[in-house]
Amino acid sequence: MNSGMVSKRYARALFNYALKNKVEDVIYAEMKKLSESFSIQRNFRATLDNPILSKKDKFELIKAAGGGSVSQEYIRFIELVLHQKREKHLQTISLGYLDLYRNYKNISIGKLVTACPVDKATVEKIKQLVLLKKTGTVDFETKVDPSIQGGFVLYIDTYRLDASVASQLRRIKDQLLSKNKKVA
């Protein structure tokens, strides 16, 4: 069966179950933590795919990745996933749940990357500008990345606005190289 279909089905089933039991916010926080664990610990997925690791050990790892002290619904879901031997789909299941939750609650994802830290007032202004264009709420985070050399990069859902100095310098370099190729 297609991996994407499996993940969507499990994510949809978990979301519907969470809505029915009014624990969608709790499960969202746990799935967000689980998803972050997959991105922080690059070998986490490979560890879960390891057939030598027992179900009990996998369960404890997934429980810890969800935040340690997790809800009973999360525990039951992880037990189901392990029983059905679907742990290799857990990362995409968690991402699918996050998408379903955000669509249901009308939440957009925003991220502001700057070369140096910015004050809260600037972040709030940018957040308010985003809210003028988007309905609902924005789950907004900031990140400092000195490699962009200045300016900022703003991500809103799938949209990306790159106003960084590094990308502007790269564009100028590419233009100069392409003009020099035409001359030669």
Image (cartoon, grey):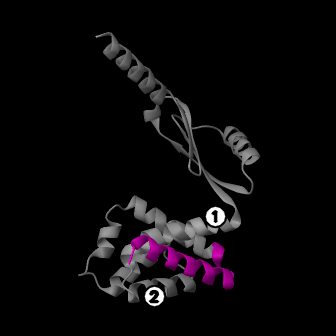
The image shows residue 22 at horizontal and vertical percentages of 69, 81
Give the residue displayed 68% in from the left and 84% down from the top: 20
Q: Could you give the CA–CA distance between mark 1 and mark 2, rounded to whole angstroms?
A: 24 Å
Give the residue displayed 56% in from the left and 77% down from the top: 12
Amino acid beneath label 1: Arg
The image shows residue 106 at horizontal and vertical percentages of 70, 61
The image shows residue 79 at horizontal and vertical percentages of 44, 87
Q: Does residue 172 show up magenta in the picture?
A: no
Instruction: Mark 1 and mark 2 in contact? Answer it, CB < 8 Å.
Output: no
The image shows residue 13 at horizontal and vertical percentages of 56, 81
User: What element does badge 1 sit on?
Assistant: helix
Figure label count: 2
Please tell me in which quadrant of the rendered image residue 130 appears.
Answer: top right
Disc ID at residue 47: none
**Mark 1 or 2, nearer chain start:** 2
Q: Can you say whether 155 is above or below 178 in the image?
A: below
Q: Main secondary structure of the magenta part?
A: helix
Q: According to the image, label 1 marks what residue?
A: 102
Q: Nearer the viewer, residue 146 or 158?
A: 158
Residue 92 left/right relative to 180 = right
Q: According to the image, label 2 marks what residue?
A: 80
Give the residue displayed 56% in from the left and 35% down from the top: 152
Q: Can you say whether 139 is above or below 98 in the image?
A: above
Residue placed furthest toward the top = 183
User: What element does badge 2 sit on?
Assistant: helix
Residue 67 left/right relative to 84 = right
